[in-house]
Structure formats: C-alpha cells, structure tokens
Image: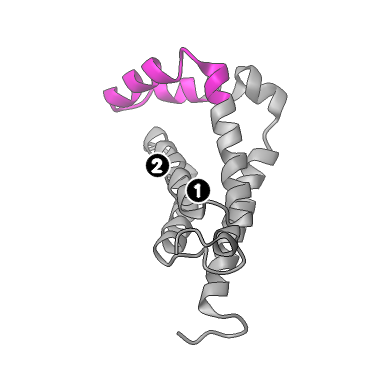
C-alpha cells in the first residue's frame, strides 16, 4: 500500500486515536450532574416509550428503566474507557467491539430518527475499518506489550 506522509499502519493509528478522541469528547461534554441524576436515561425513556418495535420498548423497560442511575454510569464510563483505550491503543479490539455495541444500541433506539444517526454511523464505520485492518499495530500499548499480534 502506498500512502503519502505516513505508512498505512500509521494512518490506521490516526483513525484509531481520532475515534478515541471522539469517544472521549462524548464523555467530556456530558453535564455529569444532570446525566447521573437521571437526565440522560430520562431522555432515553421518552424515546423508548414511543419506539415502533415492541422488543425495544420491553427490553428497555426490563433492563434500563429500573436502573437509571446504574445505566447512566455504565454509558458514561464506557465512553471514557473506550476513548482512553483507543487513544492509548490498549485492548484495542475489545474497545472497538464495545464501541460498535454502543453504536448499535443507539442505532436501534433511534431507528425512527435518521438525522441522529450520522455521528454513530461514522464512528461504527471507523471502528470496523480499524478492527479489520488491525489498527493497533503502531503507536499503541497493544503493540508495545505484544498483544493481539
């Protein structure tokens, strides 16, 4: 593969780090006080209640709605962990798959509002490219530790 300026593996690392910064920004920009006291999950409750698919409504009611505080912490700190994992290239394939899962959950929840899907679609696409191209081969703790060779 010929590229300009950086090698192919280094460009993949740039994508990985950029995606990590994107996840970190998702965590950073949240109003933590509002988010952790029900604001984030409260918004999702309203979306889930009106969802066109029964399995989404019932799954949300069974899993998320009874535990809003716990779910708020899980979502927020998953974003932080994904961001740091991708930036530093630590457990990169696990972080990429975890990010894809969060993106998929959001896709399913927001299936009726395609205007909301752009960011998640781009994040999922970058995740797939970095995952299948093994974008942890340079500039990563995974490489330094000999993980996922």
Disc 2 on helix, strand or loop? Answer: helix
Residue at 44% x, 52% y: name it: 124
Please rate how many residues cluster around mark 2, counting C-alpha atoms within 10 Å: few if below 14, some from 14 to 19, many from 20: some
Q: Quadrant of the N terminus?
A: bottom left
Res 69 → quadrant? top right
Left or right: where 100 falls relative to 36? left
Disc 1 on helix, strand or loop? Answer: helix
Colour treatment of the image: one colour
Residue at 53% x, 84% y: name it: 3
| Label disc, if present, on residue 104 of the rendered structure | 2
Question: Which of the two residues, 137 or 106, is positioned nearer the viewer here?
Answer: 137
Looking at the image, is 31 positioned above or below residue 46? below
User: Residue tagged by mark 1?
Assistant: 95
Q: Give the Cα distance between marks 2 and 1.
A: 14 Å
Left or right: where 41 falls relative to 114? right
Residue 133: horizontal and vertical position, in percent? 42, 67
Residue 103: horizontal and vertical position, in percent? 45, 43
């Amino acid at each position: 593969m010929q590229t300009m300026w950086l090698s192919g593996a280094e460009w993949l690392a740039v994508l990985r780090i950029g995606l990590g910064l994107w996840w970190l920004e998702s965590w950073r920009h949240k109003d933590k006080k509002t988010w952790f006291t029900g604001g984030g999950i409260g918004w999702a409750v309203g979306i889930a209640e009106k969802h066109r698919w029964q399995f989404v409504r019932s799954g949300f009611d069974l899993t998320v709605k009874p535990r809003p505080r716990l779910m708020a912490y899980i979502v927020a700190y998953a974003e932080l962990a994904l961001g740091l994992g991708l930036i530093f290239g630590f457990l990169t394939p696990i972080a990429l798959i975890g990010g894809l899962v969060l993106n998929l959950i959001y896709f399913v929840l927001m299936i009726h509002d395609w205007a909301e899907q752009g960011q998640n679609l781009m994040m999922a696409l970058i995740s797939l490219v970095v995952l299948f191209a093994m974008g942890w081969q340079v500039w990563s703790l995974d490489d330094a530790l000999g993980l996922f060779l």
